[in-house]
Each structure stands twice: as structure tokens, then as C-alpha cells.
Amino acid sequence: MEQIIAGIFRSEVPSLTLPPYQGTQCYWIGDAHDVVLVDTGDGSPGAQSVLEEDWHHLGRPKVLAVFATHHHDDHSGGGAWAKARWGARLYMNAPDLERLRERRRDPVDSLWQPYASDAFTVGNMGVTLINAPGHTPGQWNFWLPAHRVLLAGDNVLGNTTSVILPPDGDMGLYLGTLASLRNLRPRLLLPGHGDLVADADAYLSRYITHRQERSQEILSALAQGPREPNSIARVIYRDILPPEKMWLGEWMVKGHLDWLSRQQLVVEDNGRFRKVGQS
Ligand SMILES: [Zn+2]
């Protein structure tokens, strides 16, 4: 466990849920008496034992609540365990709760519930919940205004860009979220995976530019004529992704095409996309 600043601690738990099997960063907010845990990891024995050990290091505080930044298993999969272990209440933003209900057979509503407020205080720390859709429709970010620190969930990843895959991901919403996160002028970003980000403004600006460049590359690829998403992916990601990972590129291209369609810059014809105004 690592103390980020007074009142915020980070536990990196192993995750086997999604490639590239990067550990999930879970954050404790509070003091030796009371804490709130943001994200649980995937609930595997390895993730459980890291959280258990770090909770002891914190002085075995009362775990008042567990918040999930979003419904993906590498963030919420340990919910049942955390509830049984600490008796904590589990909170997830309503749109993501809906997604969880759709994809899980076990009773979701006896575990997770929406949160009735948009702020809480734990220890000396005031925390504001921010609706930050994009990676998922109900992604929650957590803003600590006194320290200008943002827990960014999977909207920001250390060392790499985030993945916006439909149907959960929405590129238009994501770009809007990145702009509003940048407007907060955070000093420090605490991502759901990877290292913390100290040059927050430059990092978020790079994220936005990166997406805009990808969209432009897609439009350029379509300048030569209509193409299917997998064919666009093979052009754009040819030097970035190995052939066996090209499906991921195809999904990312679909995310962009979705957004370009809504801006009426491209249209779909029988699975092939073309630029508007081009036959
Ligand atoms: Zn994640």
C-alpha cells in the first residue's frame, strides 16, 4: 500500500479479468477510524488478500462504504466479498448498475445501490462525486477539491490511453468528459490502472488530441472510398497492434465511427462506412 497524500492511500490489486491483465488501483479515503474504499478489484483471492492486508496497515478502520467507479469486473467484482468482510454498503452509479443487471445473473440489487447524494465526507476529506460518462455510461469520478486530486476511474489510465469500446463506451460522451475533467484543473490524477499522473492538464490535453487525431485518420482512410471497420483498423493500427489484437482495433474504430456518424461526418451502408458527401 502507498500513501498518495494524507488521507488517500492506494492498493494495487492483481486482476485477471481483462487483458492486458494490468493490476487495478483501488483507493482508500479517510483515516485510521473511518475509510471509504473506491473500487474493489475483481474479487479474486489475490485481490482480496491485498485489500485485507492493506486494511490492516491502515489500522483496521471502519469501512463505511465501497464505491465502484464503474461496473466492470476488475473494479466491482470484489463487492460481495467487501460487503461480507466489512459490512460496508456498496454504491454504483445508476446507469452502470443497469449494465450490471443486464450482464449478471446473480442478484445485483441486494449488493449494489445508487447513491442518494453527490458528495460525502470521510475523515477530514470532502469528496464530490462526478458523473463522468465515456468509458461506461455511469462512470463515477471522485473529486477532492481541497487537494485538487481526481480519482479518474478508467477515464484516465497511467502510461497509456483509455479504451472506449461500444456498447459501454461512447466517444462523444468521453470527449465531453475529458474536457470537463480538464476544466477542474486537477493537480493530480489517480487512474484505475497504471501510475498516477502529475501533469494532469497536459495529460488530459494529449488524450483529447489523440482521439481527434484518430478520428481524422479514419476520415483519411475513408477518403479513398467506403470501408468496413476491420479494414479501417488494419490501416490505422497496422504499426500499433499485432494481427491477433486487431479485433481490439476494430472495436476502437467502431467507437469512433459511432461518434463520427452522430456528427453526420460518415454514413453506414451495409456495414461499410463512407464519408458524407462522397460516393
Ligand atoms: Zn479497469
Image (cartoon, rainbow, N blue to C red):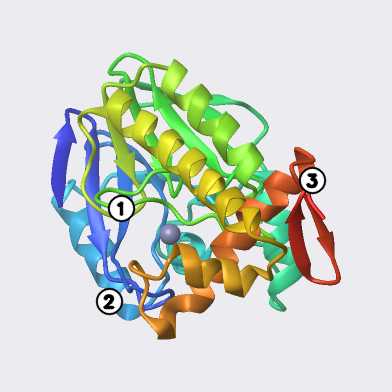
- Rounded to the nearest whole Å, what is the CA distance between mark 2 and mark 3? 50 Å
Residue 159: % across, % down: 24, 51
Q: Amino acid at mark 3?
A: Val
Residue assigned mark 3: 276
Instruction: In the displayed orientation, state which residue is furthest to the bottom.
Output: 244
- Answer yes or no: disc 3 within 8 Å of ligand 1: no
Name the amino acid type tagged 1: Thr
Q: Can you say which quadrant of the picture contains the C terminus?
A: bottom right
Quarter of the figure with residue 193: bottom left
Residue sitting at x 60%, y 74%: 230
Tell me, yes or no, whether the two marked residues, 1 and 2, touch with CB atoms within 8 Å.
no
Q: Nearer the viewer, mark 2 or mark 3?
A: 3
Q: Please tell me whether mark 3 or mark 1 is closer to you in this view.
A: 3
- Spot occupied by residue 178 in the image (x, y as percentages of width and height): 49, 32
In depth, the one of 261 and 187 nearer the eye is 261
Closer to the chain start, of discs 1 and 2, is: 2
Count residues near mark 3 (Cα–Cα under 10 Å), then give few for <14, some for 14-19, many for 20+: some
Query: Is 234 on the left-hand or right-hand side of 187?
Result: right
Circles 2 and 3: CB distance less than 8 Å? no
**Residue lying at the far right of the rendered structure:** 270
Which residue is at the front of the view, 262 or 223? 223
Q: Nearer the viewer, mark 1 or mark 2?
A: 1
Q: Where on the image, by quarter, is ligand 1?
A: bottom left
Q: Which residue is mark 1?
A: 160
Does 277 sit left or right of 79 as displayed? Answer: right
**Ligand 1 contact, mark 2 (Cβ < 8 Å):** no
Residue 227 in the image: above or below residue 172: below
Left or right side of 58 for 167 = right
**What's under tag 2, amino acid-wise?**
Gly
Q: Secondary structure at mark 1?
A: loop
Q: Which mark is residue 46?
A: 2
